[in-house]
Image: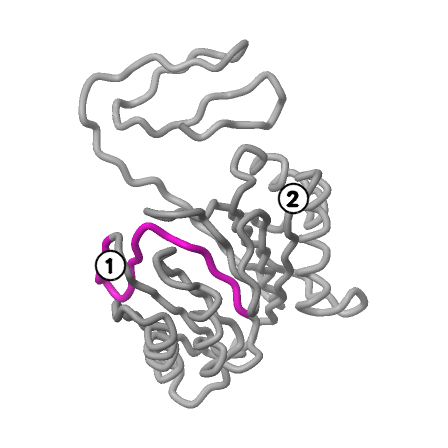
Amino acid sequence: MDRLAVGSGRSRVDDALDAGWFAASEAVAGLQGARPGLVLVYGSPRYDLALLTKAVREVTGDAPLIGASTGGQMCDGEYLPAGVGVAVFALGEGPYRFGTAFVPRPRHAEEAGRWLADSAMDAACGPEDRLPHGALLLMSAGVRERLTELVSGAHSTAGPGVPVLAGAAAGDVGSAVVMAGGDVIDDGAVALYIASTEPLRVVAREGRTDTGLPGLVATDGGTVHELAAFGIGVAEHDTPGSALAL
């Protein structure tokens, strides 16, 4: 398989257009001449994120772009704390195919998840030319309470052989948003499908530090679990296969 070109960039300047342009330019420079195949943007909600993504796309062209608002960013070993800041990650076209999709204001989260997965997979390869392997990334804003349903719908469409990673946008001020292309969505979700001829191995780990004694946590009608005192864990619901992140 061909080597994948990658690049990243960040900026903390106050102006949204300048911040987007500087971060995207640094990321594209890291591709060393390769054409951008995918762009990920994580920016502070203190920016006008519509202007910021416009500036990014002036640099990256029509490459698929998704992103989310964040309360801080990490880029190349540097942490950009809450405030103004943006991090841009670019991948060259390389051996993979990328497809994105978004849905604003979904009425039914599980149905939206199915549509997102199917649309992103079609955007990557087309319905008649899908590659044998892939992975799916979901990012949502305003549907956090229904994230489990969104993931369930996406997983049912993508199939058990496709790893699904999902998360919610954040922000230190204002509302959280997600981004797709030039669109900024304050209530909805975006999906990225990465198609590959080879299996994609996805590894997830949790990092935490205990700060006190373990405690007992329960949900209404659910099973009581003893969790470490860091305050992050999972409690099972009555519904099989569902979970609540604490």
Badge 2 amino acid: His
Badge 1 amino acid: Leu
Residue at the right extreme?
A: 128
Which residue does the image show at 36% across and 82% down from the upper left? 25
- Please identify the quarter of the rendering in which residue 102 is found: bottom right
Question: Looking at the image, which is closer to me, 144 or 96?
Answer: 144
Q: Secondary structure beneath disc 2?
A: helix
In terms of sequence position, does the residue under pointer 2 or pointer 1 come before the other? Answer: 1
Q: How is the image coloured?
A: one colour
Which residue does the image show at 68% across and 41% down from the upper left? 153
Question: Looking at the image, which is closer to me, 190 or 229?
Answer: 190
Question: Looking at the image, which is closer to me, 145 or 185?
Answer: 185
From which residue to which does the magenta span run? Answer: 65-81
Left of 19 or right of it: where is 236?
right
Check the image and report above or below for 73 versus 106: below
User: Which mark is on residue 80?
Assistant: 1
Name the quarter where the C terminus is drawn. Answer: top left
Would you name the residue on which mark 2 appears?
A: 155
Few, some or many residues within 10 Å of mark 2 (<14, 14–19, 20+): many
The verdict on residue 226 being magenta is: no
Check the image and report above or below for 9 versus 167: below
The verdict on residue 68 being magenta is: yes
Q: Position of residue 93 (x, y in %)?
A: 54, 79
Residue at the left extreme?
A: 211
Q: Position of residue 205 (x, y in %)?
A: 37, 43
Q: Secondary structure beneath disc 1?
A: strand
Looking at the image, is mark 2 or mark 1 nearer the viewer?
1
Which residue does the image show at 26% across and 66% down from the upper left? 76
